[in-house]
Image: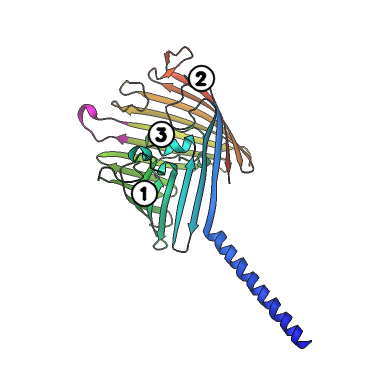
Amino acid sequence: MKKIFTLLCIVISLNLTAQEATEENESLIEKRFSINGSIDAYFRYNLNAPNNKNAVAPGSSFANLPGFALGMANVIIGYEGEKVGFVADLVYGPRGEDATFLSPALRPGGSSNIVNQLYAYWNVSKSVKLTIGNFNTFLGYEVISPTANFNYSTSYLFSYGPFNHTGIKADIALSEDFSLMLAAMNPTDATEFNPTGKYAFGAQLGYADQFLNFLLDNGAYEIDYTGGLNLSKEFFLGINAALYNNGNSGDNEAGFAGVALYPQYSTSETVSIGLRGEYFMETGDFGAIGTGVEDSSVFATTLTANIKIGELTIIPELRLDSSSDNFFLDKDLKGQKSLNSFVLAAVYTF
């Protein structure tokens, strides 16, 4: 009986030890590896313009297809170690293709038209982090993923700034409130390789969630401010302003400037209402707005609601774009200065 009892104790002890080791390993895997992402789809309708094959859309990125349309599927795989880690951010669908537009153009048949971000990082110390690879731009208020934007459609400032960079950057925490980022990168949006042998350089100075950004790219430059203020527990005001110049001189000099305000008010834990008011002006023949007229401008007002149902967010949106010239088409396919459109989007995060 003593031998049997001793044997039972050993078996139980080994079982508990194995169970503890398994739980520890599962906890470690859960902590270090992560898979998350989103999917989105939408319905878009023009109130004063065609909604068929001749449909027009605001001159900004994404949410520009008529009727019921697809956004993208986004899967983000990450690993977070004590010192090192990586992120593989993959996109598939019309929004993802628009976001990685230059990759297949530089290398036909290339596969990175599904890569939104792909980078590795090293936490050199508590205050210094090095990142190398392909990462989303540090300029601007809005981003590619609809989960991080309040509005579903995007601004002109976002659409004509850079989307992605491939290079190396250092994030430095100067103090509790101050931060500095320095980067050396391929030319803007050249994500697979460097086609010119020239490089772009970026910098970001941050203070208490307010950021001043600089980008120098083969003579062209952009200066961008991104920030916001919590005016109350329910009311937030986001701010974005930017100035871009292509670095050319004489008749070829062109660029843009603009400012956007993002007041947002939370009416409850599940419902928020926000407004994006943006003024965007191109200088010279930059060609962003598409009027064919130099020094064109556009004022866009977007009223958006976010209705959260668990991991699903329903986003109804009314957008009014008004251009200085006849950029848009009316229902008779004649030029007009305004475009009024409605979008109903669904974004699910996991």
In the picture, which quadrant includes the N terminus? bottom right
Foreground of the two, 66 or 82: 66
Q: Quadrant of residue 23?
A: bottom right
Q: Secondary structure at mark 3?
A: helix
Q: Earlier in the sequence, mark 3 or mark 1?
A: 3
User: How many circles with numbers are drawn on the protein?
Assistant: 3
Q: Residue 235 in the image: state x and y as whole percent.
A: 55, 39
Mark 3–mark 1 Cα distance, whole angstroms, equals 22 Å
Q: Residue 15 in the image: state x and y as whole percent.
A: 67, 73
Magenta-tinted stretch: 244-255
Residue type at numbered disc 3: Ser
Horizontal side, residue 59 vs residue 7: left or right: left
Q: Residue 306 in the image: state x and y as whole percent.
A: 58, 36
Mark 2–mark 1 Cα distance, whole angstroms, equals 46 Å
Residue type at numbered disc 2: Asn
Q: Residue 159 bears which disc, if any?
A: 3
Q: Secondary structure at mark 2?
A: loop
**Residue at the extreme left of the image, as rendered:** 250
Horizontal side, residue 243 vs residue 9: left or right: left
What residue is disc 1 on?
A: 205
Residue type at numbered disc 1: Leu
Q: Earlier in the sequence, mark 2 or mark 1?
A: 2
**Badge 3 vs badge 1, beta-carbon distance below 8 Å:** no
Mark 3–mark 2 Cα distance, whole angstroms, equals 24 Å
Q: Quadrant of residue 171?
A: bottom left
What residue is disc 2 on?
A: 52
Q: Secondary structure at mark 1?
A: strand
Vertical relation: 28 (above or below) 290: below
